[in-house]
Each structure stands twice: as structure tokens, then as C-alpha cells.
Image (tube, rainbow, N blue to C red):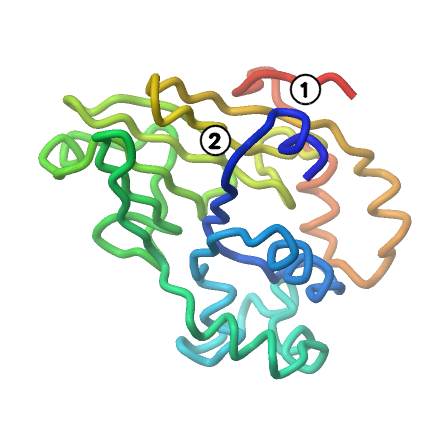
Amino acid sequence: MIFFVDAEVEKIFFLGDTVGYFPEPVNAIELLLSVQASCMLGNHDAMLIERIEIDERKDRVYQIRKTRDKSPCRYLQQMATWLPYLQLQIDSKKILMVHGSPWNPLNEYVYPDADLKNFARLPFDFIFMGHTHRPFIRKSGDVTLVNVGSCGLPRDQGNLASCAIFDTETGERNIHRIPFNAENLIKQYGNAIHSSVVSCLRRESHQIVGKMVAR
């Protein structure tokens, strides 16, 4: 959030999954509510409020059941008002923000190497997505596609949180990478996080997508 303040961001949009993987979900929810972020519903959030079934095979990693036990009812009720997508028109630009994809807002993954030709037919100028934890910016016809990546568990470079800033006047859009101490996080949570989460936090990539933020 300090980065957004320094960048003089006027509005924060969160593209889903406030919960999952880590044992302190309330902190993330409270932070988003404190800055009046517009929040989309992610598939993890949908599992938490019982809108879709928990994937029992993966819940040792996701920790949704444990999270539900720790989440006050007022936050679950707030989350129940969220949708997995939001359509906007700002400065004559038609914008879609969605957790997954335009066709399956909760669950479809759109990866950096995906075939994007079908996006060109959609009635938007910009589409912002999440879900994959892998950031990219690409074009399909006249449609600009931005996957913002993940601020909590990046899947390319594990110690670089990812977000995007969009200037609605100029159309400029950039992905930004914010370093954090992954080893401190691993030490803090210990056995409370799954070994696969530890592996993600320690993952390294030779191709970093986005602009590095000096800390």
C-alpha cells in the first residue's frame, strides 16, 4: 500500500483471492477495506463463503477451511456482496476487470502464452485479469490485456509482489514489481504454510515481467 500512496494512485481495484495459502486472512481483508478498495470475488473467496465447493484435494495448500474458522461473520457477509468481475467506462475507455476470464470469471486461467485471438471480439478497450499469479501485458486486436500477477504469492519470481497501474487518461499501463523478504515470511509462518507455498516463495525467474520498484 505504501507503493500506491507514493505513486499517487486514486483508486485501488483488487482482482480477487483475499484468502488462501497463508494463515492470517483477516489482515488482508481489513487492509483492503481500510483503503476502500473495489474488490472482485476470487475462487478462493467463493470457496470461503460457500458459493462454490472447496477443492478437498488442494485444501492442504489453500487452507480455506481453516480460514473460514478464523474469519469474522462481518467479513464473510461483506465478501458475499462481491462479484468476480466489474465493467467500467472511464475517460471514454471501456474496461473489464475480472478474476479469471471474461467467459469464466471465477475459474478460467489466462496464461502469458495463451492463444488470445478470441479476446479481440470483446467490446472492451482494456481487460485486467488475475488468478494465474503470472503477470503479462498483451494485445489482441484493439483490446489490451493485462494480467496483474499476484501481490501475495507470485509464481514467476517468488519474492517480487506484482501489481499494475493504469492511467485512464493516457491509456498507459505498467506492471510493477515490489521486492519483499520471502525468507522472513517463510520463517514467520514455518509449518503453517504448505511446502509448495515455500517453493513458490523461493522460485526464481530469468525473465522478470514489469518495472522494478526501488525499496
Q: Locate the C terminus and report the quarter of the image it occupies.
A: top right
For the residue carrying disc 2, how many other residues have a C-alpha within 10 Å: few (<14), some (14-19), or many (20+)? many
Q: Which of 122 and 194 is in front in this view?
A: 122
Q: Nearer the viewer, residue 79 or 191?
A: 79
Q: Locate the N terminus and report the quarter of the image it occupies.
A: top right
Residue extending farthest left: 121
Q: Which mark is residue 91?
A: none
Please, what is the three-letter code of the amino acid marked with disc 2? Pro
Height in image: 71 above or below 32? below
Q: What residue lies at 65% left-to-right and 69% top-to-bottom?
A: 63
Tell me: 59 left or right of 3. Answer: left
Q: Name the residue under label 2.
A: 135
Q: Which of marks 1 and 2 is nearer the N terminus?
A: 2
* Pointer 1 with pointer 2, Cβ within 8 A: no
Please, what is the three-letter code of the amino acid marked with disc 1? Val
Height in image: 54 above or below 194? below
Q: Is mark 1 on a helix, strand or loop?
A: loop
For the residue carrying disc 1, how many other residues have a C-alpha within 10 Å: few (<14), some (14-19), or many (20+)? few
Tell me: 27 left or right of 73. Answer: right
Q: Name the residue under label 1.
A: 213
Q: Is mark 2 on a helix, strand or loop?
A: loop
Q: Position of residue 23 (x, y in %)?
A: 75, 64
Tell me: 53 left or right of 66. Answer: left
Q: What residue lies at 16% left-to-right and 22% top-to-bottom?
A: 142
Q: Where is residue 29 in the image (x, y as percent from the top left)?
A: 64, 61
Q: What residue lies at 46% left-to-right and 49% top-to-bottom?
A: 15
Marks 1 and 2 sit apart, C-alpha to C-alpha, by 15 Å
Tell me: 106 left or right of 183. Answer: left
Q: What residue lies at 82% left-to-right and 34% top-to-bottom?
A: 181
Classify residue 84 by image quadrant. bottom left
